[in-house]
Image (cartoon, rainbow, N blue to C red):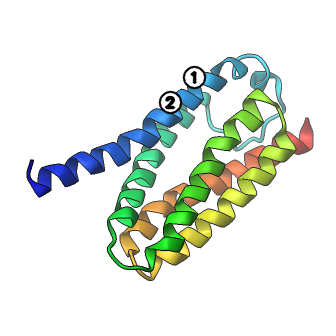
Amino acid sequence: MTIKKTAALHLFAWITAPIFIGFVMGMLTKSAIPTWYALLNKSPLTPPNYVFSIVWSFLYALIGISGWLIWNEKRATTKNMKLLYILQYILNVGWSPLFFSLHLTGTALICLIGLIAATITLIYECYNHIKIAAILLIPYLGWLLLAVHLNWYVWKFN
């Protein structure tokens, strides 16, 4: 297999893995949407339910590309970026069960604030070394900022 084909295959894996994991997490928490989540007082800024899967699929692709760029960077400066990438991803995956399965909206909010802090730090670290990886994470950060408002609203008014 040529180097280009190998790189393309790795990029494809980096893109599809977060999308697939996001899909699985969505399936695991799906039952809470028409029951528990539907009955909550939600922010007027809450998008329709179908928007979440569309936006997250797009964001997971960007997160995957960013991760691929970080892991393919040959400089020694990537150690912190890799650790931050892993941290933000663990917090990302951990939020859904906290919020939808366990209904721990306050704990989920703390998790989300940590996720935002890790993502901001990751963007900052990447910007000086792998600028495109940082730029790809900006829409994700924007969505997380909306998510923290939505989570806060549910925590505060329920």
Residue 94: percent from left, percent from top = 67, 42
Dot 1 amino acid type? Met
**Residue most extreme to the left:** 2
Give the SS element for disc 2.
helix
Residue 25: percent from left, percent from top = 58, 31
Determine which quarter of the picture holds residue 132: bottom left
Query: Which residue bears the numbered disc 2?
Result: 23
Tag 1 near tag 2, CB within 8 Å: yes
Of residue 2 and residue 94, the one placed in the foreground of this image is 2
Q: Is residue 113 left or right of residue 27?
A: right
Of residue 124 and residue 14, the one placed in the foreground of this image is 14
Mark sitting on residue 53: none
Q: Residue at (63%, 22%) from the top-left corner?
A: 30
Residue 122: percent from left, percent from top = 55, 69
Q: Residue at (57%, 65%) from the top-left corner?
A: 84
Dot 2 amino acid type? Phe
Q: Residue at (32%, 43%) from the top-left corner?
A: 13
Q: Is residue 116 left or right of residue 98?
A: left
Can residue 142 be spotted in the picture? no
Say above or below: 122 vs 8.
Answer: below
Mark sitting on residue 27: 1
User: Which image quarter is the C terminus in?
Assistant: top right
Say above or below: 45 vs 41.
Answer: below
Give the SS element for disc 1.
helix
Alpha-carbon span between mark 1 and mark 2: 6 Å
Q: How would you rate the neighbour count of disc 1 (Cα within 10 Å): few for under 14, some for 14-19, many for 20 or more?
A: few
Residue 72: percent from left, percent from top = 32, 65
Can residue 5 be spotted in the picture? yes
Determine which quarter of the picture holds residue 154: top right
Q: Residue at (74%, 58%) from the top-left corner?
A: 113
Q: Is residue 16 left or right of residue 145?
A: left
**Number of numbered discs on residues:** 2
